[in-house]
């Protein structure tokens, strides 16, 4: 360890994306190791718009493992955090900084306490898979700090033990979480199917839907589905394996029609299984249903799929448009049906250039939007201000990266406490 | 036929109940004959509160088959009406009224035109299975008029060709529709499991839920589910057969806990299959979801099932309380969460005595209702005036009956036209 002084701090800062499943993960075969009952496939979202930044640090001066999430100290005692910390420490290897005269041996890592500060650039409670980005970032950053030599696949198996879907956030682009069959979970890892550059036409718009209902956590929900749904087993054994093959093919061929069909039907089937759970779980609400109906009607009107929709364990819609032009048309429709109650700049977030694509620069432009052509001429469609809190425009994005700028660190390099 | 004059009219008036499935029918194996892919079980609702009254008449003076529904003439050309008329005419037998000197031979029935007037004592469009009561009543009344000697089972197979669930309205109490396996459909008939007197504690409250969405018809919906849902086949082949056995047992033993569990889970599974359909079908809305949540929370709080819920192809909740006292407590809760926007007498319909059971006599009593005890003390629950249009209080009831009073006929005995 450090020879001359115990005041040194070594830290690493990393940034990780969130991801949205297009073939859903729902149901564990092992609750502790977080092993799923089927493969799943996701799209990684651009961390420029949705990401977690995490700084991890060690110092002989630290008295205990501590963590701050979005500036507030939280407990690390949960087994999910403990599992990730333990697994990374076991794989730590020697670190040496000759300039600063710091040497940390393989064994030292187990004795040094860590400080962790984590920050989401999007609302944690909005149901946007913050735990996926969070655990991916934690494991990635700790792995860099502690000189873990294992590849991203092995890291993904550790992140999985923090939050199942976190394993898919270790890669950018299009990612498969292979369920594996080993009891240790070592083969239940993420693999990249294609990078984000493979299919860079896609544009993603997330509708954060206002909700008054308290939702069932996905951990509780999937446990109850496994215990009570008579349809889930059939889904995981008979339906999903075929869809995984078809989805891999659709992604490889950039076949939007198949991609869209599979994405929508698998989202709907996941919510069907939730409804088949006892007591039933409702994640989608009337606004979610409306968004599905608008997209289905539009796709049908065009004769080809323009937009795919998918919903996780909450009412928010994740809409994937085939290209930028289509995304503009989608945003027009969304702003038509769900006009803002607030100013435009806080209503459309992320890649605001899609607003220009949509020809919308002001609230007045939104008032002037015509009915979409798929609406029958004789019906003036109802509009629902207030049903959507805001939209985030984004795209498929890259995996975790280390941030080297000192100003990007969330912990003070002198005190090891949040800045 | 009539010897002396062609001005005579022979008519019969009957009254038929509607029914609510507790193990659901969803999916046909034959669209024309209306043959289902699984057995179903229903409870017949008391015709005092929900029924169809139908008068059928023949006369040599009638120029064509005609029908009036709720006072408005409608076309009989659809194959559903044509199938029922044809099947009944094929089974007609000789009629003789010596007093009036009228004789109608087996062959005459095929030449005589019918007039039909039908009236629902509840809103047709409210999604309360009006077609079940309607076709059951039509077939029952025509059978009486045309001296059909077949039993109710054979009549149920004819009503089935008008509307699948109509076959279950030929009996009172608890009824099973046996799917059968003959290609002609002759063994796809209703059988009575138990009369309404077998289990007369049950009280049923229907919440007619306000809806702004146009719904998919059940005919279209089930066709699309059969074509696209990957879960429906598993449901009909693997899940329903077991539930049918269990439900028959629960009814035989008046075992409310099992009855309730099966009723709720089967309703939820039917809606799960609708969601698994492409494009997805949403029959329940946020109000339906709220009602389910309130009932689940209450049942859980009590530790034993108080109330079962089931939803057909629409947002209306059919709530089955274990007894009158529980029904009073249920109505208190319903009026607490969904206070009326209108006067009480048009908000709680049917068996209004349940209001007394609930201790509610005025709108003031509703304002004064306390939070249900299952609600946590520190949370003031939200109330939703306007989300429910009205409630109907009823119970399991009898099958179709002939009405003999001349004032009960819907057709004028002299003109054969609606009164």
Image (spheres, coloured by chain):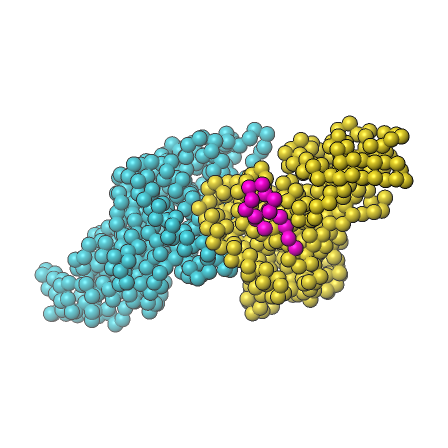
Chain colours: A yellow, B cyan
Q: Does the magenta-highlighted stretch encompass residue A87?
A: no
Which quadrant of the structure image shows residue A250? bottom right
Left or right position of B24 against A120: left
Residue B61 placement (x, y as % from top left): 21, 70
Q: Does the magenta-highlighted stretch encompass residue A182?
A: yes
Left or right position of A404 against A356: right
Taking the spot 56% from the left edge, 44% from the top edge, the residue there is: A182
Q: Could you tell me which quadrant the C terminus of chain B lies in?
A: bottom left
Is B349 or A286 nearer to us in this picture? A286
Taking the spot 36% from the left edge, 45% from the top edge, the residue there is: B243
Q: Is residue A248 visible?
A: yes
Residue B267 placement (x, y as % from top left): 42, 47
User: Looking at the magenta stretch, what is its main secondary structure?
Assistant: loop
Q: How many marks?
A: 0
Q: Residue furthest left?
A: B98
Is B347 or B300 nearer to us in this picture? B300
Is B290 or B360 nearer to us in this picture? B290
Q: Could you tell me which quadrant the N terminus of chain B lies in?
A: bottom left
Residue B405 placement (x, y as % from top left): 22, 52
Q: Which range of residues does the magenta coloring cover?
A: A178-192
Taking the spot 41% from the left edge, 46% from the top edge, the residue there is: B266
Which quadrant of the structure image shows residue A298? bottom right
Residue A86, compared with residue B141, is above or below; it is: above
Taking the spot 13% from the left edge, 63% from the top edge, the residue there is: B94
Q: Residue furthest top?
A: A63
Is B358 or B148 nearer to us in this picture? B148
Residue B36 placement (x, y as % from top left): 34, 57
Residue B195, compared with residue B139, is above or below; it is: above
Residue B227, compared with residue A287, is above or below; it is: below
Q: Is residue B217 visible?
A: no
């Amino acid at each position: 360890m450090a020879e001359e002084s115990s005041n040194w701090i070594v830290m690493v800062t990393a940034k990780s994306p969130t991801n949205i499943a297009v073939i859903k993960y729902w149901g564990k075969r092992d609750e502790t190791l977080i092993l799923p009952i089927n493969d799943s496939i996701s799209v990684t979202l651009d961390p420029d718009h949705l990401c977690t930044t995490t700084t991890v640090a060690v110092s002989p001066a630290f008295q205990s493992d501590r963590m701050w999430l979005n500036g507030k100290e939280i407990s690390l005692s949960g087994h999910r955090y403990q599992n990730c910390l333990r697994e990374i420490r076991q794989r730590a290897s020697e670190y040496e900084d000759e300039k600063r005269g710091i040497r940390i041996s393989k064994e030292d890592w187990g004795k040094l306490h860590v400080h962790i500060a984590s920050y989401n650039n999007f609302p944690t409670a909005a149901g946007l898979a913050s735990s996926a980005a969070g655990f991916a970032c934690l494991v990635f950053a700790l792995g860099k700090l502690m000189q873990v030599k294992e590849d991203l696949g092995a890291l993904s198996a550790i992140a999985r033990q923090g939050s199942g879907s976190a394993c898919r956030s270790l890669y950018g682009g299009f990612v498969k979480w292979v369920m594996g069959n080993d009891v240790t979970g070592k083969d239940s890892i993420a693999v990249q199917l294609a990078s984000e550059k493979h299919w860079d036409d896609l544009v993603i718009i997330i509708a954060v839907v206002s909700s008054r209902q308290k939702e069932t956590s996905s951990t509780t929900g999937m446990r109850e589905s496994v215990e009570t749904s008579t349809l889930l087993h059939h889904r995981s054994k008979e339906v999903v394996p075929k869809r995984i093959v078809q989805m891999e093919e659709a992604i490889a061929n950039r076949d939007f029609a198949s991609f869209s069909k599979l994405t929508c039907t698998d989202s709907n089937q996941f919510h069907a299984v939730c409804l088949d759970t006892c007591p039933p779980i409702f994640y989608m609400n009337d606004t979610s249903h409306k968004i599905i109906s608008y997209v289905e009607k539009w796709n049908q009107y065009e004769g080809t799929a323009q937009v795919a929709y998918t919903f996780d364990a909450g009412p928010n819609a994740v809409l994937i448009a085939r290209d930028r032009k289509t995304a503009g048309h989608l945003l027009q429709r969304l702003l038509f049906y769900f006009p803002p109650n607030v100013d435009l700049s806080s209503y459309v977030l992320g890649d605001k250039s899609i607003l220009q694509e949509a020809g919308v620069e002001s609230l007045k432009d939104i008032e002037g939007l015509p009915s979409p052509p798929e609406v029958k001429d004789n019906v003036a469609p109802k509009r629902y201000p207030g049903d959507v809190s805001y939209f985030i425009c984004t795209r498929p994005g890259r995996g975790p990266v280390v941030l080297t700028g000192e100003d990007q660190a969330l912990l003070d390099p002198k005190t090891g406490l949040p800045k």
